[in-house]
């Protein structure tokens, strides 16, 4: 049949996911405020819990400290690279003047 998946397409079906409870036991979150900036830049968040195998999800907004808001500027997380004791990420802030940046992180250690 033309629409039958090949064996290569099915490889992802063989992965088994741990239970939700097991996943949440190794998950944590953090928030960081960065100095006002604009354009493309490289940022760092340090933590002894981060390893190269850590899954990192990042959300960014305009703001300062614990105050976040949805402004007119577009902010894009372009790359995320966890390493030993830190995560590096590239951020693009599409605005002509410097803006305060608040990043929320969600980490999952397998």
Image (cartoon, rainbow, N blue to C red):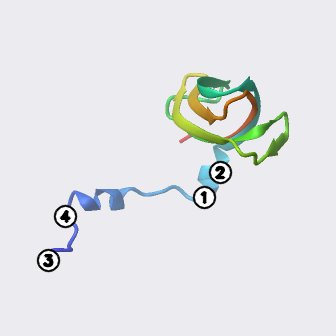
Q: Which residue is mark 1?
A: 20
Circle 1 — which element?
helix
Q: Given this view, does label 3 or label 2 mark the residue nearer the observer? A: 3
| Among the 4 quarters of the image, the one containing residue 75 | top right
CB under 8 Å between callouts 3 and 2?
Answer: no
Question: Which is closer to the viewer, label 1 or label 4?
Answer: 4
Q: Residues within 10 Å of mark 4 (few under 14, many from 20)?
A: few
Residue 66 lies left or right of residue 7; in this view the side is right
Which badge, 1 or 4, is on the more N-terminal residue?
A: 4
Left/right placement of residue 94 relative to residue 52 reads right
- For this view, does 36 lie left or right of residue 21? right
Could you give the CA–CA distance between mark 2 and mark 1, rounded to whole angstroms?
6 Å
**Residue ID for mark 4:** 6
Q: Residue 10: percent from the left, percent from the top?
A: 27, 62
User: Which residue is under mark 2?
Assistant: 24
How far is disc 3 from disc 4 in space, using C-alphas?
10 Å
Place residue 87 in its image quadrant. top right
The disc, 3 or 2, on the residue closer to the chain's N-terminal end is: 3
Report the mark closest to the observer, 4 or 2.
Answer: 4
**Cα gap from disc 4 to disc 2, whole angstroms:** 34 Å
Query: In terms of secondary structure, where does tag 2 sit?
Result: helix
The residue where tag 3 is placed is 1
Label 4 sits on a secondary structure element that is loop
Q: Is 82 situated above or below 6?
A: above
Cα–Cα gap, marks 3 and 1 = 36 Å
Which quadrant of the figure has residue 107?
top right
Residue 51 image offset from top left, x and y in percent: 55, 28
Neighbor class of circle 1 (other Cα within 10 Å; few <14, some 14-19, many 20+) is few
């Amino acid at each position: 049949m033309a629409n039958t998946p090949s064996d290569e397409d099915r490889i992802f079906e063989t992965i088994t996911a741990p239970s939700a409870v097991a996943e949440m036991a190794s998950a944590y979150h953090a928030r960081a405020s960065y100095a006002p900036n604009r354009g493309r830049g490289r940022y760092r968040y340090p933590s002894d819990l981060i390893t190269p195998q850590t899954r990192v999800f990042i959300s960014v907004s305009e703001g300062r400290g614990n105050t976040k808001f949805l402004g007119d500027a577009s902010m894009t997380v372009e790359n995320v690279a966890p390493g030993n004791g830190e995560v590096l990420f590239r951020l693009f802030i599409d605005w002509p003047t410097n803006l305060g940046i608040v990043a929320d992180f969600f980490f999952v250690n397998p």
